């Protein structure tokens, strides 16, 4: 990885984070797009504002849930497309401190994350359905896109002043921010339309180590100039594929692997959706996290807290199960990445230096071939979860397959339901 990716070193090491989508939309409970998708009237939407009071919110509980799941960083929506701000911005009245809840949720959040030793990420929507200078009529998903009265808007410059001002606030008033997750560019709303060079200069000035996603140039669609040989100044530090794991990881046009983070919903929505019970099973999520790491990427797994400020029960259960596996097998994730050995048919390899992690998702019967790894390169093999020795073997069963190295488990009950990991130490 070349110089440009130095800044994201911790991020590529940590591999696993939590996305949190939280805002007024948790009340209608039909996802975070509800204001735009259903063309909700301002009157109705502001009634949610006047009622918003997530009384059960506890920043430490959110942070601890992430930590227990083995996540190392969290990214929370400080402002989503609806324009509502979870922080005490001086630049708008449409903010949490003016709701019955009154508290600056972002302030509590950053403090709790730091207390738990987690890195701090902030999502900021470039799109804004509330600001009077943001294009509305016939415009991309805006709740007033069919409303002729919204044809004439205030000059877009006014919105840019506001947006830059808010990002300045977020980068100035909450201590060290590790990730700024911009969302998103489309059509002509891209790059310098956001005054992106100036924006990133300001951000770098205030937060020299901060990393950003690539969405000042793209949406979930497209990789942006980060994937070219000459990334723009505002290309961001990682690609942000959405609800998909890139089939072969992501490389730039020089063929070099570049950092990426797949953001994944736990059910089918980002913001809380009361009737969406289509949750992914914990073991699937674990296997997909391994897949991300084996392809050189991260996973950002989403939770959409409900209107009381709690994580949905289903999400908590999934997080707990992931945490159980991570607590014993996290070494195959943190600091690991693409292996020098090709994907074995029974699972995946991840690798960190001279340690290869064989993540076995298909239960073997009899000797398991360690595809691609020559016998004389192996110093030892251990079961990662308890450190116990796993022996390589060659006997009459393996003799028909010269050139392959085999291991056998002393007892198949030792295998993990989700994914057994072998640590293979190379010489
Ligand atoms: C999309 C959506 C948004 C969500 C984001 C997460 O761009 O507009 O609702 O926050 O993806 O990646």
Image (cartoon, rainbow, N blue to C red):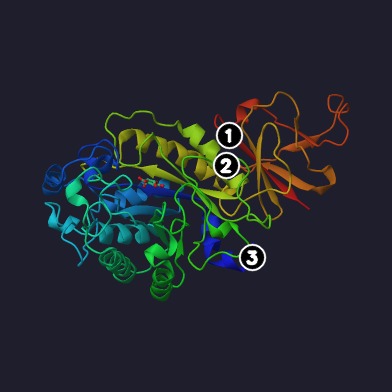
Q: Is residue 310 visible?
A: no
Question: What residue lies at 51% left-to-right and 58% top-to-bottom?
Answer: 11
Q: What is the crowding at mark 1: few (fewer than 14 residues within 10 Å), some, or many (at least 20)?
A: many
The picture places residue 338, in percent across and down from the top left corner, at: 65, 49
- Secondary structure of the residue carrying numbered label 2: helix
First-in-chain label (3 vs 1)? 3
Q: Disc number at residue 419? A: 1
| The CB of the residue at mark 2 lies under 8 Å from ligand 1 | no
Q: Disc number at residue 290? A: 2
Question: What residue lies at 41% left-to-right and 35% top-to-bottom?
Answer: 318
- For residue 173, what is the image quadrant? bottom left
Proximity of marks 1 and 2: CB atoms separated by less than 8 Å: yes
Cα–Cα span, label 3 and label 2: 24 Å
- For residue 9, what is the image quadrant? bottom right
In the rendered image, the quadrant that contains the N terminus is bottom right
The picture places residue 112, in percent across and down from the top left corner, at: 32, 58
**What residue is shown with label 3?**
2
Cα–Cα span, label 3 and label 1: 33 Å
Q: Disc number at residue 40? A: none
First-in-chain label (1 vs 2)? 2
């Amino acid at each position: 990885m070349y110089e440009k990716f130095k800044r994201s070193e911790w991020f590529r090491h940590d591999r696993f984070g939590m996305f949190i989508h939280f805002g007024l939309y948790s009340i209608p409970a039909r996802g975070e797009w509800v204001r735009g998708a259903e063309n909700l009237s301002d009157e109705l939407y502001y009634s949610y504002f006047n009622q918003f009071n997530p009384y059960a919110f506890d920043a430490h509980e959110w942070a601890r849930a992430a930590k227990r799941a083995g996540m190392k960083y969290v990214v929370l929506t400080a402002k989503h497309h609806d324009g509502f701000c979870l922080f005490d911005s001086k630049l708008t009245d449409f903010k949490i401190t003016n709701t019955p809840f009154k508290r600056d949720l972002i302030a509590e959040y950053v403090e709790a994350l730091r207390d738990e030793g987690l890195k701090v990420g902030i999502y900021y929507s470039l799109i804004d359905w509330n600001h009077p200078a943001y294009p509305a009529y016939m415009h991309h998903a805006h709740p007033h896109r069919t409303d002729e009265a919204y044809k004439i808007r205030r000059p877009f410059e006014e919105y840019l002043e506001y947006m830059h001002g808010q990002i300045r606030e977020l980068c100035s008033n909450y201590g060290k921010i590790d990730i700024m997750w911009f969302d998103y560019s489309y059509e002509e709303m891209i790059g310098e339309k956001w005054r992106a060079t100036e924006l990133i200069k300001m951000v770098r000035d205030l937060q020299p180590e901060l990393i950003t996603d690539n969405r000042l140039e793209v949406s979930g669609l497209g990789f942006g100039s980060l994937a070219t040989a000459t990334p723009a100044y505002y290309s961001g530090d990682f690609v942000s594929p959405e609800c998909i794991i890139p089939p072969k990881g992501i490389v730039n046009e020089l063929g070099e692997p570049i950092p990426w983070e797949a953001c994944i919903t736990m059910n089918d929505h980002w913001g809380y959706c009361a009737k969406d019970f289509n949750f992914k099973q914990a073991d699937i999520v674990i296997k997909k996290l391994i897949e991300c790491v084996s392809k050189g990427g991260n996973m950002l797994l989403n939770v959409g807290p409900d209107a009381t400020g709690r994580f949905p029960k289903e999400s908590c259960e999934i997080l707990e199960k992931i945490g159980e596996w991570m607590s014993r097998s996290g070494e195959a994730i943190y600091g690991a990445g693409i292996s020098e050995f090709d994907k074995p048919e029974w699972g995946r390899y991840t690798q960190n230096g001279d340690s290869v992690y064989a993540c076995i998702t298909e239960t073997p019967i009899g000797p398991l071939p360690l595809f691609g790894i020559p016998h004389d390169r192996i110093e030892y093999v251990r079961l990662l979860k308890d450190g116990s020795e796993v022996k390589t073997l060659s006997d009459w069963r393996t003799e028909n397959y010269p050139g392959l190295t085999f291991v056998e488990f002393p007892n198949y009950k030792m295998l993990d339901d989700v994914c057994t990991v072998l640590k293979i130490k190379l010489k």
